[in-house]
Amino acid sequence: MPQPSLQPAVDDIADRQAELAAIIRRFTPDLGVQPTAIGPLHFIRSDAPSDTLHMVHKPALCVLAQGRKEVRLHGESYFYDPLNYLVVSVTLPLAGQVVEASPEQPYLCARIDIDPAQITQLIADSSPIGVPAPPPGRGLFLDRVDSSLLDALLRLVRLLDTPQDIPMLAPMALREIFYRLLRGQQGQRLYELAVVDSQAHRVTRAIEWINQHYIEPLRIEELAQRVNLGVSTLHHRFKAITAMSPLQYQKQLRLQEARRLLLAESLEVSAAAFRVGYESPSQFSREYSRLFGASPLKDLAKLRSLA
């Protein structure tokens, strides 16, 4: 018996991606990250491959209409393209680089910021949601784009042409998008992080606490007590989600903020080091060089030349 062809489904997805690309092009007259009239929705455009950009990435869904990007998490690489979407489910220090883009075929991305409270409410409203249950993994994952997710995303971005409908219809479209993420093959990763009082949720609380207090000395015993986890459990689950220990995570936050201060506020290296919690400028310079590949002064000179 002949097997059914997958071509119609592939063509349907290609048509949806072409429509998404056309909408993003219309709403990105400039390069870089562009806000939209829908608060959580941003469009990103690049007409050429980029240098590595370091960032502290908040929870978000990223869907590409064109191009290809590499994201690195503490030495691990994740490549995604129009066939695979990226979800960052917890706040993570990442390095990203557009690897495929041109003026004729620019990199075009739709990013939707994820409010964890909305995921928690959606789970409460629809439980049991019946999500797949793979082993716990990183707070960053790739999954296959399908027509259901693209349909929901297109319903959201089409609202930009009828702004009067955004207040009523955008929340419903966002809710469906988050539902589709939970029902995806990797949905359990998002699910377990949002379920209040699960071990994974307690780790997310630890992550957010470090983000808010990264300048302060980090005492693991106190942090474990704060989120009601044993010290060894916190270490194990924290590294499973972020690929880093809590101290390594804090270090990356400090260094990325110091880099921002050096560039935006023209601080001296020692002043930036003290501002983010370092007591030793020499230790700061060594760790800065390991993360960014150059000393603070050389890195700053390169960033300014690129600007």
Image (cartoon, rainbow, N blue to C red):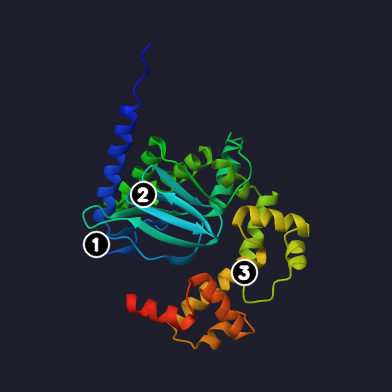
Instruction: Provide the secondary structure element on which disc 1 rests.
Output: loop
Quarter containing the C terminus: bottom left
The reply to whether the C-beta atoms of the residues labelled 2 and 1 are less than 8 Å apart is no
Marks 3 and 2: in contact by CB < 8 Å?
A: no
Give amino acid for label 3: Gln
Q: Is residue 230 above or below residue 147?
A: below
Q: Where the N terminus falls, by quadrant? A: top left
Q: Is residue 164 visible?
A: yes
Q: Quadrant of residue 236?
A: bottom right
Residue found 34% across the figure and 43% down from its top: 154
**Up-down relation of residue 6 to residue 261 (above or below):** above
Gap in angstroms between the C-alphas marked 1 and 3: 37 Å
Would you identify the image quadrant in which residue 75 lies?
bottom right
Give residue 64's mark: 2
Q: For residue 206, which quarter of the picture?
A: bottom right
Determine which residue is flagged by label 3. Answer: 250
Earlier sequence position, callout 2 versus callout 1: 1
* 280 vs 188, nearest the viewer: 280
Query: In percent of the image, x 43 and y 46: which residue is there?
Result: 85
How many other residues sit within 10 Å of disc 1, few (<14), some (14-19) or many (≥20)? few
Q: Position of residue 153 (x, y in %)?
A: 38, 44
Q: Nearer the viewer, mark 1 or mark 3?
A: 3
